[in-house]
């Protein structure tokens, strides 16, 4: 079952530049920067009202975020992530209802979370992530 919106993923060319807006203009605190090698991104997290803003900077030209930035040079909202207590059963449930999966099996994302993406062609254009907290 979905529990809440966990985070909103925002593609940026440079976390260094973008974090100034979140910190100085919006007054949010950066909770940390982490590289997720598997996804070829560097991430920075901010929190507001229990929902995280996840800034995503590509670490390689073949990163999915680099491709997104080619189409959206100013950056933009890349994905929305829902927290669930069981990614595997959620994936099974949505795929049985006809949703196309990008990840059939969960992968490991930032903070050791299990994550999996649903294809935007069956989510009305919104790249959707399901995530489950790691056991650490
Ligand atoms: Zn995410």
Image (cartoon, helix red, strand yellow):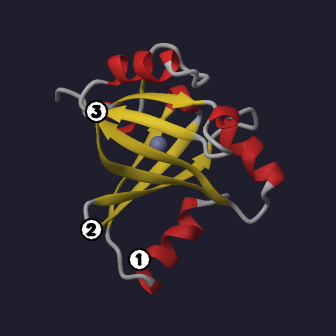
Question: What residue is at 79 percent from the left and 60 percent from the top?
Answer: 73
Residue 122 lies in quadrant: top right
Does residue 40 appear left or right of residue 94 in this picture? right
Residue 119 or 44: which is nearer the viewer?
Answer: 119
> Are the residues flagged by discs 1 and 3 in contact, CB closer than 8 Å?
no
**Cα distance in 3D space between marks 1 and 3:** 33 Å
Q: Position of residue 69 (x, y in %)?
A: 75, 52
Residue 98 or 57: which is nearer the viewer?
Answer: 98
Judged by depth in the image, the label closer to the viewer, 2 or 3, is 3
**Cα distance in 3D space between marks 2 and 3:** 21 Å
Using the image, determine if residue 58 lies above or below residue 114.
below
Q: Looking at the image, can residue 106 be seen? A: no
Question: What residue is at 17 percent from the left and 26 percent from the top?
Answer: 135
Residue topped by disc 3: 1
Badge 2 or badge 1: first in the primary sequence = 1
Question: What residue is at 54 percent from the left and 20 percent from the top?
Answer: 103
Q: Which residue reaches farthest left?
A: 136
Badge 2 or badge 3: first in the primary sequence = 3
Question: What residue is at 37 percent from the left and 34 percent from the top?
Answer: 131
Q: Position of residue 105 (x, y in %)?
A: 46, 13
The crowd level at tag 3 (other Cα within 10 Å; few <14, some 14-19, many 20+) is: few
Q: Position of residue 113 (x, y in %)?
A: 32, 32
> Are the residues flagged by discs 2 and 3 in contact, CB closer than 8 Å?
no
**Cα distance in 3D space between marks 2 and 1:** 15 Å
The crowd level at tag 2 (other Cα within 10 Å; few <14, some 14-19, many 20+) is: few
The numbered disc on residue 23 is: 1
The numbered disc on residue 49 is: 2
């Amino acid at each position: 079952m979905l529990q809440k919106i966990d985070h909103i993923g925002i593609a940026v060319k440079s976390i260094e530049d973008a974090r100034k807006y979140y910190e100085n203009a919006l007054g949010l605190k950066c909770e940390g920067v982490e590289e997720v090698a598997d996804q070829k991104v560097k991430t920075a997290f901010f929190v507001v009202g229990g929902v995280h803003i996840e800034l995503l900077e590509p670490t390689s030209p073949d990163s999915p975020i680099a491709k997104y930035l080619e189409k959206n040079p100013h950056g933009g909202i890349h994905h929305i992530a829902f927290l669930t207590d069981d990614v595997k059963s959620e994936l099974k449930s949505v795929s049985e209802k006809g949703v196309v999966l990008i990840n059939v099996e969960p992968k490991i994302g930032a903070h050791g979370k299990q994550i999996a993406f649903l294809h935007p062609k069956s989510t009305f254009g919104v790249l959707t992530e399901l995530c489950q907290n790691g056991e650490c």
